[in-house]
Amino acid sequence: MVAYVIIPGIDGSDEQHWQTLWERQWGASAVRISPDSWSAPDLDDWVDAVQAAYDEASRRDSQVVLVAHSLGCWAASAWLAKNPSSPTGGAFLVAPPDPHGPAFPRQAAATFTELSAQPLPCPALVVGSANDPYCTPEAAADFAARWEARWHLAGACGHLNSASHLGSWEQGRELLDSLTRQ
Protein backbone atom coordinates (compact mmCIF):
# COMPACT_ATOMS: atom_id res chain seq x y z
CA MET A 1 0.00 0.00 0.00
CA VAL A 2 0.94 3.61 -0.54
CA ALA A 3 0.37 6.57 1.74
CA TYR A 4 0.09 10.03 0.24
CA VAL A 5 1.18 13.39 1.62
CA ILE A 6 -1.00 16.11 0.06
CA ILE A 7 0.88 19.41 -0.30
CA PRO A 8 -1.38 22.15 -1.71
CA GLY A 9 -0.40 25.68 -2.68
CA ILE A 10 -1.29 28.97 -1.00
CA ASP A 11 -4.54 28.79 1.02
CA GLY A 12 -4.83 25.03 0.47
CA SER A 13 -6.95 23.24 -2.12
CA ASP A 14 -10.67 23.96 -2.18
CA GLU A 15 -13.46 21.37 -2.33
CA GLN A 16 -13.39 21.13 -6.16
CA HIS A 17 -9.62 20.78 -6.47
CA TRP A 18 -8.30 17.42 -7.71
CA GLN A 19 -6.09 17.13 -4.61
CA THR A 20 -9.12 17.34 -2.33
CA LEU A 21 -11.07 14.88 -4.48
CA TRP A 22 -8.16 12.41 -4.48
CA GLU A 23 -7.71 12.84 -0.73
CA ARG A 24 -11.35 11.85 -0.20
CA GLN A 25 -10.90 8.79 -2.42
CA TRP A 26 -7.73 7.73 -0.58
CA GLY A 27 -9.30 8.18 2.86
CA ALA A 28 -6.94 7.17 5.67
CA SER A 29 -4.10 6.65 3.17
CA ALA A 30 -3.80 10.42 2.67
CA VAL A 31 -2.46 13.10 5.01
CA ARG A 32 -2.72 16.81 4.12
CA ILE A 33 -0.13 19.25 5.40
CA SER A 34 -1.38 21.88 7.89
CA PRO A 35 1.00 24.82 8.02
CA ASP A 36 0.12 27.80 10.19
CA SER A 37 0.99 30.12 7.31
CA TRP A 38 -1.45 29.08 4.55
CA SER A 39 -2.06 32.62 3.27
CA ALA A 40 1.38 34.11 3.91
CA PRO A 41 3.56 31.06 3.32
CA ASP A 42 6.71 30.70 5.39
CA LEU A 43 9.04 28.09 3.92
CA ASP A 44 10.23 26.73 7.27
CA ASP A 45 6.64 26.38 8.50
CA TRP A 46 5.64 24.56 5.31
CA VAL A 47 8.67 22.23 5.43
CA ASP A 48 7.83 21.45 9.08
CA ALA A 49 4.23 20.73 8.01
CA VAL A 50 5.47 18.35 5.31
CA GLN A 51 7.60 16.61 7.94
CA ALA A 52 4.63 16.20 10.30
CA ALA A 53 2.44 14.83 7.51
CA TYR A 54 5.23 12.52 6.33
CA ASP A 55 5.72 11.19 9.85
CA GLU A 56 2.01 10.44 10.15
CA ALA A 57 1.80 8.87 6.68
CA SER A 58 4.91 6.72 7.17
CA ARG A 59 3.36 5.20 10.31
CA ARG A 60 0.55 3.94 8.06
CA ASP A 61 2.59 2.58 5.16
CA SER A 62 6.19 2.06 4.23
CA GLN A 63 5.91 3.80 0.86
CA VAL A 64 5.04 7.50 1.04
CA VAL A 65 4.41 9.57 -2.08
CA LEU A 66 4.34 13.38 -2.04
CA VAL A 67 1.48 14.88 -4.09
CA ALA A 68 2.17 18.60 -4.49
CA HIS A 69 0.50 21.45 -6.34
CA SER A 70 1.75 24.96 -7.05
CA LEU A 71 3.79 26.42 -4.17
CA GLY A 72 3.53 23.00 -2.53
CA CYS A 73 6.00 21.74 -5.17
CA TRP A 74 8.66 24.01 -3.72
CA ALA A 75 7.80 22.97 -0.15
CA ALA A 76 8.12 19.33 -1.25
CA SER A 77 11.48 19.90 -2.94
CA ALA A 78 12.80 21.85 0.08
CA TRP A 79 11.68 19.04 2.41
CA LEU A 80 13.32 16.42 0.18
CA ALA A 81 16.56 18.44 0.16
CA LYS A 82 16.55 18.40 3.99
CA ASN A 83 15.61 14.71 4.15
CA PRO A 84 17.39 12.95 1.27
CA SER A 85 17.51 9.61 3.06
CA SER A 86 13.83 9.49 4.06
CA PRO A 87 12.23 6.62 2.18
CA THR A 88 10.01 8.40 -0.30
CA GLY A 89 8.29 6.49 -3.10
CA GLY A 90 8.06 9.54 -5.32
CA ALA A 91 7.19 13.20 -5.74
CA PHE A 92 4.29 14.19 -8.00
CA LEU A 93 4.84 17.92 -8.63
CA VAL A 94 2.02 19.69 -10.45
CA ALA A 95 2.15 23.28 -11.74
CA PRO A 96 5.19 24.59 -9.89
CA PRO A 97 5.16 28.39 -10.02
CA ASP A 98 8.25 30.17 -11.28
CA PRO A 99 9.75 32.08 -8.32
CA HIS A 100 11.36 34.46 -10.82
CA GLY A 101 8.28 34.85 -13.03
CA PRO A 102 6.16 38.00 -13.14
CA ALA A 103 3.08 36.40 -11.52
CA PHE A 104 4.87 34.83 -8.53
CA PRO A 105 3.35 36.12 -5.25
CA ARG A 106 6.60 37.64 -3.99
CA GLN A 107 4.97 39.58 -1.16
CA ALA A 108 2.95 36.68 0.22
CA ALA A 109 5.62 34.00 -0.31
CA ALA A 110 8.84 35.95 0.19
CA THR A 111 10.68 33.03 1.83
CA PHE A 112 10.17 30.94 -1.32
CA THR A 113 11.72 33.40 -3.79
CA GLU A 114 15.33 32.24 -3.42
CA LEU A 115 14.64 28.55 -3.98
CA SER A 116 16.19 26.76 -6.92
CA ALA A 117 15.55 23.31 -8.30
CA GLN A 118 18.18 20.76 -7.24
CA PRO A 119 18.26 17.00 -7.98
CA LEU A 120 15.65 15.14 -5.94
CA PRO A 121 16.53 11.96 -4.03
CA CYS A 122 13.50 10.02 -5.27
CA PRO A 123 11.62 9.37 -8.51
CA ALA A 124 9.68 12.47 -9.50
CA LEU A 125 7.28 13.66 -12.16
CA VAL A 126 6.61 17.32 -12.95
CA VAL A 127 3.34 18.14 -14.70
CA GLY A 128 2.85 21.54 -16.29
CA SER A 129 0.37 23.35 -18.48
CA ALA A 130 0.85 25.18 -21.77
CA ASN A 131 -0.97 28.24 -20.41
CA ASP A 132 -0.21 28.31 -16.68
CA PRO A 133 -0.25 31.99 -15.61
CA TYR A 134 2.37 31.25 -12.92
CA CYS A 135 4.92 29.37 -15.01
CA THR A 136 5.78 28.95 -18.67
CA PRO A 137 6.09 25.39 -19.97
CA GLU A 138 9.76 26.08 -20.68
CA ALA A 139 10.44 27.10 -17.08
CA ALA A 140 8.52 24.06 -15.74
CA ALA A 141 10.47 21.75 -18.07
CA ASP A 142 13.69 23.37 -16.81
CA PHE A 143 12.64 22.73 -13.18
CA ALA A 144 11.94 19.10 -14.10
CA ALA A 145 15.39 18.76 -15.67
CA ARG A 146 17.12 20.31 -12.65
CA TRP A 147 15.04 18.17 -10.25
CA GLU A 148 16.05 15.17 -12.44
CA ALA A 149 12.35 14.41 -12.79
CA ARG A 150 10.25 13.20 -15.68
CA TRP A 151 8.38 15.99 -17.45
CA HIS A 152 4.82 15.94 -18.78
CA LEU A 153 3.00 18.79 -20.51
CA ALA A 154 -0.71 18.32 -19.80
CA GLY A 155 -1.91 20.69 -22.52
CA ALA A 156 -3.67 24.03 -22.03
CA CYS A 157 -5.10 23.53 -18.54
CA GLY A 158 -4.34 26.83 -16.81
CA HIS A 159 -2.84 26.39 -13.34
CA LEU A 160 -4.15 22.79 -13.09
CA ASN A 161 -6.38 23.80 -10.18
CA SER A 162 -10.12 23.90 -9.53
CA ALA A 163 -10.49 26.87 -11.91
CA SER A 164 -9.26 24.48 -14.62
CA HIS A 165 -12.40 22.33 -14.08
CA LEU A 166 -10.41 19.10 -14.00
CA GLY A 167 -12.72 17.33 -11.54
CA SER A 168 -10.98 14.22 -10.22
CA TRP A 169 -8.45 14.61 -13.08
CA GLU A 170 -8.16 11.08 -14.43
CA GLN A 171 -5.13 11.98 -16.60
CA GLY A 172 -3.36 13.12 -13.44
CA ARG A 173 -4.18 9.85 -11.65
CA GLU A 174 -2.74 7.90 -14.58
CA LEU A 175 0.42 10.02 -14.40
CA LEU A 176 0.67 9.51 -10.64
CA ASP A 177 0.18 5.77 -11.09
CA SER A 178 2.99 5.73 -13.68
CA LEU A 179 5.26 7.33 -11.08
CA THR A 180 4.36 4.92 -8.28
CA ARG A 181 4.83 1.89 -10.56
CA GLN A 182 8.50 2.84 -11.24
Image: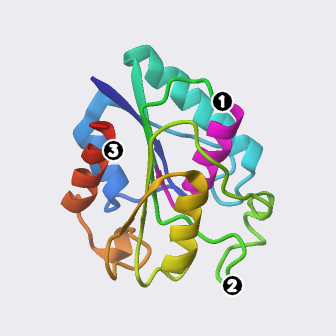
Q: Of marks 1 and 3, which one's residue comes earlier in the chain?
A: 1
Left/right of residue 78 with respect to residue 97 in the rendered view: right
Q: Amino acid at mark 1?
A: Asn
Label 2, on which residue? 102
Q: Which residues are magenta?
A: 68-83
Circles 1, 3 touching at the beta carbon (< 8 Å): no
At label 2, which amino acid type do we have?
A: Pro
Could you tell me residue 81's position as x and y percent?
68, 39
Residue 40, horizontal then vertical, whole percent:
71, 59
Distance from Cα at disc 2 to Cα at disc 3: 31 Å
Label 3 CA crowd tier, 10 Å (few <14, some 14–19, many 20+): some
50 relative to 169 in the view: left or right: right
Distance (Cα) linking label 1 and label 3:
20 Å
Q: Is residue 26 above or below residue 145?
A: above
Mark with earlier residue (2, 3): 2
Residue located beneath label 1 in the image: 83
Residue at position x 53%, y 30% in the image? 53
Mark 1 and mark 2: Cα distance apart in space? 31 Å
- Amino acid carrying label 3: it is Leu
